Structure formats: C-alpha cells, structure tokens
Image (spheres, coloured by chain):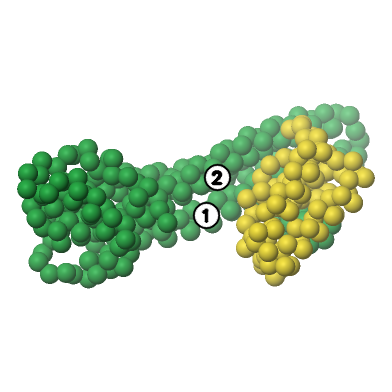
Chain colours: A yellow, B green
Amino acid sequence: MIVRISGEEQYRLPDGDKERLNELENAVIASIDAGSEGAFPPAFTALLDYVRSNGEVLGDEELDSSDVILPPSDLTFAEAGREFTGEGLIPD
Amino acid sequence: MAGLTGRMSTVVKAKVSKLLDRAEDPAETLDYSYQKQVEQLQNVKKGIADVVTAKKRLQMQESTLQQSVVKLDTQARQALAAGKEDLARTALERKNVAQTELQGLDTQVAELEDQQQKLTDSEQKLRAKIEAFRTKKEVIKAQYSAAEAQVRISEAATGVGEQMADVGLAMQRAVDKTENMKARADAVQELEAAGTFDDITQLGGGEDDIDRQLKQLSSQPAVDDELAKMKSELGSGESAPAPQIAAGEDAPAAEAGQS
C-alpha cells in the first residue's frame, strides 16, 4: 500500500497496516466531530507519524500512484473541519 | 479510507485526471505528458518567486517600522526631558502600535520562509520525478510492444501527475497565505501613509483622528509602564541627559504588546 503525505513523501506500507491507519484516522475524525481543537493536533500528528515511522520512503525514480493521500501536516483544525462540509481542503 | 483521506485523495485524483486528460490522440500522450510536466515545473518556479517577492515586501516594511520604533523612542525621551509628557505619551503610543505590527510581520515572514522552503523541496522532488519519467519512457518504449508501452507509460505519467497535483496544492496554499498576509501588510501601509509613524514633532496642536485611533490600537498599560520607566531613567528630570540614540534598541521589545 502506498500512502502519500501531501507536501512530503510517498511511503510504502504493508497492506496489513490498513487497519491501524483506519483506527488512527477515526481518532482524527472523532476529534473534528467533537469540535475538539485540543484533541485534533495530537490525533492528526499520530496518524502522520505512524506513516512516517512505519513506511519506507519511495525513491524519486519510482513513479507509482498512491492508494491513500493524507492532508499536509500544517492542516489547521478549521481546514480539517471544512473537509466535512464539502468545501474541501483546496477548492478546485 | 473515508473522511479526511478519502476527500483528500479525491481532490488530488481529480486534479491528476484533469492534468492527464487533455491529449486527444493517445499516441501523443507520452510526449504531451512530458511537456506538461516541464510546464508545471515552470509554474512551481514562478510560485516560489511570488512567495519570495511577498516575503521581501514584508521585510521592507519591517525595516521601516524598526526605524520608526527607534525614532519614536528617541522622540519620547526628548519630549519627556523637555517636560512635554503628552507628546511623550503620543510617541510611545505610536511606538507601541509599531512594535505590535512588527511582531505580526515577524511571524508572517517566518511563515513565508517555511513556505518557500517547502516549495523548493517540492520543486526538486518534482524535477527528479520528471527526469525519471523521461528516462523510463525511453526504456519502456524500447522494451515493450506499442500497446503495452502505452499502458506502462500512462501509469508512470499518472504517478508523476500525482506529484504535480500535490505541488499544485502546496502552491495554492502558499498563495492563499500570502494573500491573507497582504491584507495585513496593506493595513500597516495605510497607517504609514497616514503619517502614523512619522516625526511626532510635526504634529499640530490638537488631537486628531489618527491619535484617537492610536489610543485604541495601542496597549495603554504597556504605554503607561514604558512612560514610568522612561521617567525613572531620566531621573527627576532636572538634569536630564541628552537622549541616547541607542536607547530605542534596548527598549525591551518584550515589554510592549506581548500579551
């Protein structure tokens, strides 16, 4: 499975990590749903850190598409909230 | 994955297909892809240049404001030494506003530097991927039948397209940020244009609109503190020494407008 962190790298992770990634993402979503500006940064950082520390960075010569694309690390709570109101991270 | 990443993936993939869909003749797709990639690289360079320009503009404002802070501090001391406390207070109010603006500008310059670094890294990565694509394209053409090559090169082009789309998103964020900052820079410029940070000895007698606005903008407790401190530095005021030009620099920046 290939995961991109927007603005950073693409990482190759074992397919078995999908479940753990889902859990971490659910925690991020829960913090947003709860409107918890305090819980969001650690949850989001935990998700990104998991990918960074368990993934293997793809070399520049590898031209694969990602299976999952994570938002950039400087995503703000407000931006994350907009994800769910349909405006999207970056309007087209 | 739904939600956060799902949305993000959708946005990026939509951009990738937009980038790749434009060639009408499949036979042209390969060279067209490469050409689009090189064009995009130029756009990224332009984006970086825009960020640098925005940063320079803010830095110029910073240096003007820094000069104003030093000047107003000196003038406040002079006014106080001459027993004109009102004038000294006005100068300190203006200095306080200038310092607050300076802090805001500092943060913004740091943010833009961060953006610039990120875009530069992205540009290098994209350049490396484009180079890899160019090489790979030739290898694939030589090794596979035309139909098979078409498929494989399309896959590679999609991979590069994703990188391009991602850099595009990063640029969009940078542009949004600089635009937000421009609003603030314009506000500072208006204050400057109104003579806010000019020589206070040029002031007329009465309190004008600018003064009333400044009273609201500046932190009165900080101004009070600084005025008291300046008074004690000047001793009882009778044998006040000539104001030190360097005084503006050790006027503790942390003291005003920090809250």
Q: Is residue B205 left or right of residue B158?
A: left
Neighbour class for label 1 at 10 Å: few (<14), some, many (≥20)? some
Q: CB atoms at circles 2 and 1 under 8 Å apart?
A: yes
Marks 2, 1 in one chain: yes
Amino acid found under the numbered disc labelled 1: Lys
Residue A25 visible (yes or no): yes
The answer for which chain carries disc 2 is B
Amino acid found under the numbered disc labelled 2: Gln
What quarter of the picture does the C terminus of chain B occupy?
bottom left
Tell me the SS state at disc 2.
Answer: helix
Q: Which residue is the site of mark 1?
A: B177
Residue A45: x percent and y percent?
A: 71, 49
Front residue of A31/B113: it is A31
Circle on res. B115: 2
Residue occupying the point 7% across, 44% down: B239
Front residue of B176/A39: it is A39
Residue occupying the point 90% across, 51% down: A19
Tell me the SS state at disc 1.
Answer: helix
Q: How many marks?
A: 2
